[in-house]
Image (cartoon, coloured by chain):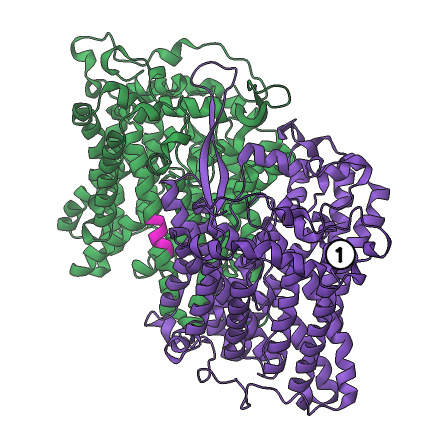
Chain colours: A purple, B green
């Protein structure tokens, strides 16, 4: 049900996908191939018409504009990074094509069209690490090899989706998803710095300093506009505009700034490199001649394809989960199995066309849902016992409804296709590369600042007497909180460290390992009470869990509501925080 | 009484300087020359020994370090500005000499040694405007002419101090002192920008961009450290160190940064220009041959001397008032007449030695008192009616005592003299000029951000339902608040505009005009109730008023406590805000 008030009956199908109570061979997910996908489609299909009809509200327009920028700018930024580090094989045209392809497929066919799919920083890391490896042997086979990585990746995707293996995502807790968010944020900030270092190397000192200045000020602009958007200035409507269009305003202003005649214009800072519209960056046809690859290499591509699948299994599903996170009052069901199957298809197509493989965008996916959410800032009056006129008035933000539909995703995809045409490519060429360093900083810092790890760290820094006594974290031993974030940070830094080496392609293994580590080792060191405060199941929404085979088996008779006590308290006091770009949880 | 607990009896002399109840010729201040000065000395002299004895605490050490930076850096910044705009007549040596002279005289002889006296941005503006005027006729007489301006200025100072005219300062309200603070802040920020523009002009684009970057990041560093210092992280002691040494840390870091080998070091940004130690910048003897000036020009200097006196009358006395503002629990009396007489003496000496004329530093004076204040962050528990564990815990900052003494001012002066020696001048030469643009931004923005005008403006932007109902400003019509700040801003912008022209020397007249304007016109447009919220008497402390002839005649039977209701409420809720550099009120 969208904001327009489509009626909805509790569908029996919503809850009918489960393995609970099943016995014999029926308990084995692998033995019932395609069952999850079937239920996903059956569950979502009845909403298809409302997915179009519900779209005709202003929020959809705001969402399209916001998501266009939030999707396009980072995609270009990562592509720029890949362009330089893969011998200019992946260029802007490939990046745009991959984003547009994903947007078209997922907006039309996905069970959960809220999940924005596109080019991520991690696939950039993946692609240039493979380039570094291939370079050692024979750089000329890179296109064909990447195509086979895509093909094998697609096959593994299909195996996973038919095998109903997405179900295990319901065991993902904040322990791993926060660590993942922190890792992504740090990688992005490093990328931003690299972008600026490159400016110094390519264009010299003057351009380097100007680029650094623009990146810092762009970051400051978008950051402050988004902060203002979630403050209590002006009316809710004006604030909403700031929050919706912070990227737009910041980008237009600083692109304009970079062209001011005089000292700034005369400094030749790097602009976005573009090539002919609709043509691959390299002189090749779109279809890669993947059949011209030595069979030996086809086999070598298998483990790489498997790692791609592992990465996407976590990355795509987590972004889908955060797009449907607990704070959004979603009414329509999602479908993880079906969407992962679709992701296999885009992986296949992108692979043989020589595009960067698109997948769910961790920082941007929840921003899409946020841009479609109708927030109401309500007044919370806390009566004090100090007498009249002394009550405390605080804003409390409530998410009242989400405009759940496919059109915003679809139109954004059309806009991406439009961007691939000659005239708009020329516009892109006016943008300084430095701006993208700024984009990396905004997205990266957003992911770090809102992260539960940093929040707990800040909590530990506060002077204890000013901590509200009702705060559940107050009652947990400080060293336990320290141990908790130390464990998370150990994974984060292991991932960051590995990303700087040629072993970078192994990082998905590390991330996936956090899920069993959380289940097996963590309960030995923390009591259940501590875990209920420190951790939380990332999925709690029933309509989301329906696609994952129902609720996870919880330890010792706890209910889902007994978890995430810290978040629950924060929400009861301050309401739901608006999603800033890059912020993952809370 | 200092923090060390010197006993004090209410002295009869404290209250014996007044004209209330006097009749006949005795009512006329001018007819009783020197009466104010006599009482100032008589009132303060008994504390002289305690002014030395009370100094032996850690706060004095922190104060010396903080004030050394807070005084030195802006003084150098203004001198740099003068250096370029007065044909290199005033240089670093003159600026340091003037600061050291003032510090020595006022720390040893002043009735109120808390008031830091030094080189201000306004005297820089004054000096180069006179240079622009003199240049039209004969630039070679500039030194002698400036000497005469100083001599006449000194004479007018002495007339004012013997005529007991400082008494009128008790009528100064926030209406004019906020406008003045805003004006000073804007001028400083403009100076910072000019400094950077100059870097582009002198050293080219690369240096310009690097300088801009350093200035912005220096501003950010000091600003954030000071904000952290007034937050609730860590323990009160650690926070205190951040607040005390923010300038020190920021300066050391960014000076070091500017010397990093590679791209930064290879970019030749401007360093502070220094000349031989203890010698005037120009090849001249320290004593100006003021007797070699055409008599015609001696007479021309009279109105300029008068304007100097007007400027200092307001600027020096207001800085003295803010150094003894209401939020500081001062126990020792001040003395405005005597200090103004002393200021005449330093004006005379600085004038004939060709130094920039020192006077009270508006942004820095309250910082000195702040650095000597013992703050205690107490816990304020607001019980709510929502049940147990829901009370709200907030910090409330209380100023419990001030270490009132002369030693911090005196040692800081010694440090300034030390800075004039060869080795330390070499250290100064390593500092990039860009840093001083950053200093301008910190001081200027501090003055703007904490200003009552901006605070009221921000209040108007807030969504009304989130404003606490106990807030007195809530009950005033919005258009009246708008009118109030519009009137203040009219004066501010008139002053800023005039400062950009050759008529700049006239700005003291505009500022002084605000005092009668407030008394004559304002009450016609605002009700007494409105004024009691919007305005406040800048001096309310009894020990301070004692030197100004007692309380001002208040309208319609109000008491001093009936004024400044907005401030009173804020203080009762959040306590006294710590003074950041540049912040003037609240």
The residue beneath circle 1 is A491
Residue at mark 1: chain: A
Residue A132: x, y in percent?
70, 80
Residue at image x 73%, y 30%?
A475
Residue range highlighted in magenta? B187-192
If the image is split into quadrants, where does the C terminus of chain A sit?
A: top right
Helix or strand or loop: what does disc 1 sit on?
helix
The quarter of the picture where residue A218 lies is bottom left
Residue at image x 64%, y 50%?
A13
**Is most of the magenta stretch helix, strand or loop?**
helix
The quarter of the picture where residue A292 lies is bottom right
Residue A27: x, y in percent?
82, 54
Residue B68: x, y in percent?
51, 43
- Compared across the picture, whether B586 is left or right of A538 comes to left
Instruction: Name the outermost residue toward the left.
Output: B296
Instruction: Please state which of residues A72 and A196 is positioned toward the viewer in this rendering.
Output: A72
- Compared across the picture, whether A274 is left or right of B453 comes to right
């Amino acid at each position: 049900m969208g904001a327009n008030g489509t009626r909805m009956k509790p569908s029996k199908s919503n809850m009918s996908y489960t393995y609970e109570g099943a016995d014999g061979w029926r308990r084995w997910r692998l033995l019932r191939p395609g069952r999850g996908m079937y239920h996903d489609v059956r569950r979502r299909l009845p909403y298809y018409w409302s997915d179009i009809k519900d779209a005709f509200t202003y929020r959809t327009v705001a969402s399209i504009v916001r998501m266009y920028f939030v999707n396009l700018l980072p995609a270009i930024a990562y592509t720029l990074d890949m362009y330089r580090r893969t011998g200019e094989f992946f260029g802007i045209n490939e990046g745009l094509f991959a984003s547009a392809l994903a947007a078209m497929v997922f907006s039309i066919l996905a069970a959960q069209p809220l999940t924005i799919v596109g080019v991520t920083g991690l696939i950039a890391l993946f692609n240039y690490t493979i380039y570094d490896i291939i370079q050692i042997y024979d750089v000329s086979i890179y296109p064909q090899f990447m195509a086979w990585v895509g093909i094998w990746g697609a096959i593994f995707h299909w195996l996973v989706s038919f095998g109903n293996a997405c179900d295990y995502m319901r065991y993902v807790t904040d322990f791993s998803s926060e660590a993942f968010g922190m890792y992504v944020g740090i990688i992005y900030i490093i990328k931003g710095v690299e972008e600026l270092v490159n400016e110094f190397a390519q264009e010299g000192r003057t351009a380097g300093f100007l680029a650094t200045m623009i990146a810092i000020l762009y970051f400051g602009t978008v950051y402050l506009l988004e902060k203002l958007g979630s403050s209590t200035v002006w009316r809710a409507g004006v604030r909403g505009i700031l929050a919706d269009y912070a990227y737009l305003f910041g980008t237009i202003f600083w692109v304009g700034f970079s062209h001011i005649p005089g000292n700034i214009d005369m400094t030749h800072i790097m602009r976005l490199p573009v090539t002919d519209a609709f043509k691959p960056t390299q002189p090749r046809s779109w279809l890669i001649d993947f059949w011209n690859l030595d069979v030996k290499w086809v086999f070598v591509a298998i483990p790489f394809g498997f790692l791609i699948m592992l990465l996407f299994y976590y990355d795509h599903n987590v972004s889908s989960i955060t797009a449907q996170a607990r704070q959004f009052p979603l009414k329509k069901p999602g479908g993880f199995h079906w969407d992962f199957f679709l992701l296999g298809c885009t992986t296949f197509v992108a692979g043989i066309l020589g595009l960067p493989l698109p997948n769910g965008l961790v920082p941007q996916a929840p921003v899409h849902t946020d841009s479609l959410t109708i927030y109401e800032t309500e007044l919370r009056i806390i009566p004090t016992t100090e007498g009249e006129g002394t009550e405390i008035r605080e804003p409390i933000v409530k998410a009242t409804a989400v405009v759940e539909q496919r059109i915003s995703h679809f139109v954004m995809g059309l806009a991406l296709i439009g961007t691939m045409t000659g005239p708009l490519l020329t516009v892109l060429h006016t943008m300084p590369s430095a701006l993208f360093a700024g984009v990396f900083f905004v997205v990266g810092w957003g992911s770090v600042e809102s992260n539960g790890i940093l929040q707990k760290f800040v909590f530990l820094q506060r002077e204890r007497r000013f901590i509200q006594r009702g705060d559940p974290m107050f009652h947990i031993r400080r060293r336990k909180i320290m141990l908790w974030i130390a464990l998370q940070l150990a994974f984060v830094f292991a991932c960051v460290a590995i990303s700087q080496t040629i072993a970078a392609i192994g990082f998905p293994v590390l991330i996936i390992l956090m899920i069993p580590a959380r289940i097996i080792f963590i309960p030995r060191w923390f009591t259940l009470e501590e875990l209920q405060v420190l951790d939380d199941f990332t999925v709690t929404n029933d309509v989301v869990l329906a696609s994952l085979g129902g609720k996870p088996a919880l330890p010792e008779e706890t209910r889902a509501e007994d978890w995430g006590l810290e978040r629950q308290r924060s929400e009861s006091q301050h309401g739901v925080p608006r999603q800033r770009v890059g912020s993952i949880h809370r």
